[in-house]
Image (tube, grey):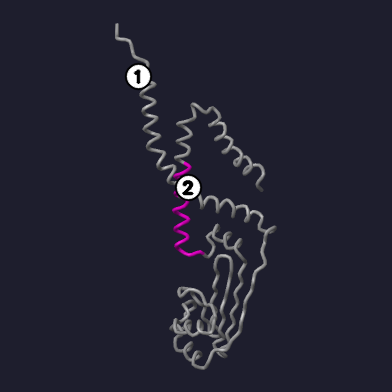
Amino acid sequence: MGAPVNSAVHPAAAAQQRARWLKAILPWHWISSALTLAGLLAFAVTGITLNHAGAIESRAVVRSCTAQLTPEQQALLRRLAPPGDAARAPLPEALRAALRGQGVVEGPASALAEWSADEVYLPLPRPGGDAWLRIDRATGELEWEDADRGVVAWLNDLHKARHTGVAWAWFIDLFAAACVMASVTGLLLLALHARRRPSTWPLVAAGLALPAALALLAVH
């Protein structure tokens, strides 16, 4: 007849294993949660503002001006035009410097202008606003307009990564990865505590079932 099995060993081993899991998971969870806290709040708020964009739409503040390039600037434009009148090329830096001296905002140096035989058109979209610059190549007439739609539109465009550039796109990807980490580690922590909290899995199931039901039944 074999020796009796000490049943007290098994709960103790299970408790030790649970403690090891908690010790391994908690740092990942609180660090990823801390890193994503501000971003999650911002994305949640802008999700509401985007969902009710028609009710909180702001009026754009528009600034515009017209000017005439000097003969020297017109000569500079002709001399520094891209070879073969390329369809898209940056505005020459020397001309940009001359325009800055006239108070014309012409955007980042990497912005591509659209060159044609008649004009140079430089679109300057940005989060929360838009601007453009047009130069008549024959007469040297310059037109510039800038529209600023306000802080809410700026935040909404950040939410959508609209005209935000490469750095913000990378941030969005890293932020999403951190959110996935916080969610997965949070789910593992729920699993570790579920035995002492009977409502854990019904609440998790409800959080999954409600959006799924709405997507299937109420979204057309």
What's the residue at 48%, 87% (across, down)?
A: 77
Mark sitting on residue 179? 2
Image location of residue 97, percent across then percent down: 47, 83
Mark sitting on residue 164? none
Does 44 appear above or below 186? below
The amino acid type of the residue labelled 1 equals Val
Query: Residue 66 sits in which quadrant?
Result: bottom right
Name the chief secondary structure element in magenta: helix
Does 36 appear above or below 15? below
Image location of residue 96, percent across then percent down: 48, 81
Task: Assess whether mark 1 and mark 2 are in contact (beta carbons under 8 angstroms).
Answer: no
Which residues fall within the magenta stretch? 164-183
What's the residue at 52%, 28% (across, down)?
A: 197
Does 32 appear above or below 94? above
What's the residue at 57%, 81% (across, down)?
A: 134
Query: Residue 82 sits in which quadrant?
Result: bottom left
Q: Look at the numbered disc 2 and give the secondary structure of its residue.
A: helix
Q: From the image, which quarter does the N terminus lie in?
A: top left
Seen from the viewer's position, the closer of residues 101 and 108 is 101
The amino acid type of the residue labelled 2 equals Cys
Q: Which residue sits furthest right?
A: 55
Which residue matches tag 1?
9
- Marks 2 and 1, the one that precedes in the sequence: 1
What's the residue at 48%, 34% (across, down)?
A: 190
Mark 2 or mark 1: which is in front? Answer: 1
Seen from the viewer's position, the closer of residues 185 and 118 is 185
Query: Residue 80 sits in which quadrant?
Result: bottom left
Let me know if residue 130 is in the magenta part: no
Q: Look at the numbered disc 1 and give the secondary structure of its residue.
A: helix
Image location of residue 4, percent across then percent down: 33, 10
